[in-house]
Amino acid sequence: MDLSRFKKAPKNLDFKDLVIFENENYVVINKPPFVPSLDERTADRSLSILKLAREQYEDIQLCHRLDKETSGALVLAKNSEAYRHLSMQFEHREVQKEYHAVVNGVHDFDSVSVFLPIAIVKDGTAVRIDRQRGKLAETVFFTLQKFARHTLVRCIPITGRMHQIRVHLQCLNAPIVCDPTYNGDYIFLSQIKRKFNLKGETEELPLIKRVALHAHSIHFRDLDENLLSITAPYPNDFEVLVNQLVRFSS
């Protein structure tokens, strides 16, 4: 199924509307899906989070990245000292990030740790498990809510490799919904709602049109060593998906 026509950045995006926390050192935003963190190496470089941020703050820097389709908490530093301070926390694995994902299948994850090395494939667009040449990666998973055919999962990445959560969930036979790269099936209302009728010859579209992964919260220390804990609310598409599962799955 080709969903490319739906995978477009919101129009007239204002960086200020994305901000969920700000002080003299950091800005934390709730990144919308389909907006890259950095400028992409494509002909269309019209929009990225960093470019939007620098329209408001001249010297701001991204402290980490989120995949283009992933929504949620993303931290930017307003000065070089703040950037170095958070970079050291990332290096020493002192930053705690929590993601929420809707996955295929019904699963009981109670602090299930996946500790498998990851290597980037040749074209750089995906990763695979590679026990010989891969870089160490670890993710811990918890079940938040089970539905008839799907599960809402809390994901705690200990390391920060590319596509780590996605490929580790695939290893648990719990690929993320709408993630065909890692064998994640689409989710349709007709799968979860009884007596569902599609009008005429209309094509049924998935309930979510992107990888169902959201960076729900992040915890790190400010320059004064006080702990900052910021939560990013679900964006509309992810919230609708979860609400529909709650409503129709039993």
Image (cartoon, rainbow, N blue to C red):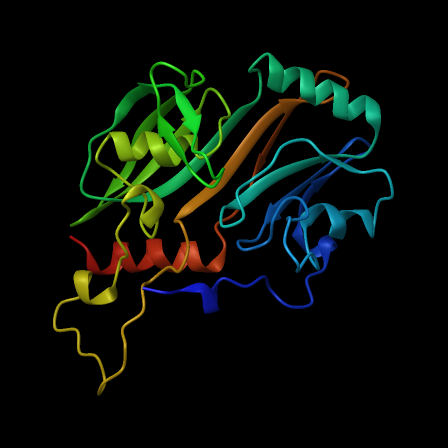
Please tell me which residue is depicted at 17% across the width and 49% down the height of the picture: 149
Please determine whether, in this image, residue 185 is positioned above or below residue 131.
below
Q: Viewed as shown, does residue 178 lie left or right of 232?
A: left
Work out whether residue 232 can be spotted.
no
In what quadrant of the picture does the N terminus appear? bottom left
Quarter location, residue 72: top right
Work out whether residue 190 can be spotted.
yes
Residue 151: image x %, image y %? Answer: 25, 43
| Depth order, front residue of 100/49 | 49
Please tell me which residue is depicted at 53% across the width and 53% down the height of the picture: 33
Please determine whether, in this image, residue 139 is positioned above or below residue 56.
above
Q: Residue furthest bottom?
A: 200
Q: Viewed as shown, does residue 223 lie left or right of 200?
A: right
Residue 232: image x %, image y %? Answer: 55, 43
Please determine whether, in this image, residue 139 is positioned above or below residue 238.
above
Please tell me which residue is depicted at 33% across the width and 27% down the height of the picture: 141
| Depth order, front residue of 57/39 | 39
Residue 64: image x %, image y %? Answer: 63, 32
Quarter location, residue 4: bottom left
Please determine whether, in this image, residue 245 is positioned above or below residue 183.
below
Please tell me which residue is depicted at 47% across the width and 59% down the height of the picture: 236
Q: Residue furthest front?
A: 122
Q: Residue furthest right?
A: 58
| Depth order, front residue of 5/220 | 5
Residue 67: image x %, image y %? Answer: 52, 43
Number of callouts: 0
Q: Viewed as shown, does residue 245 lie left or right of 126?
A: left
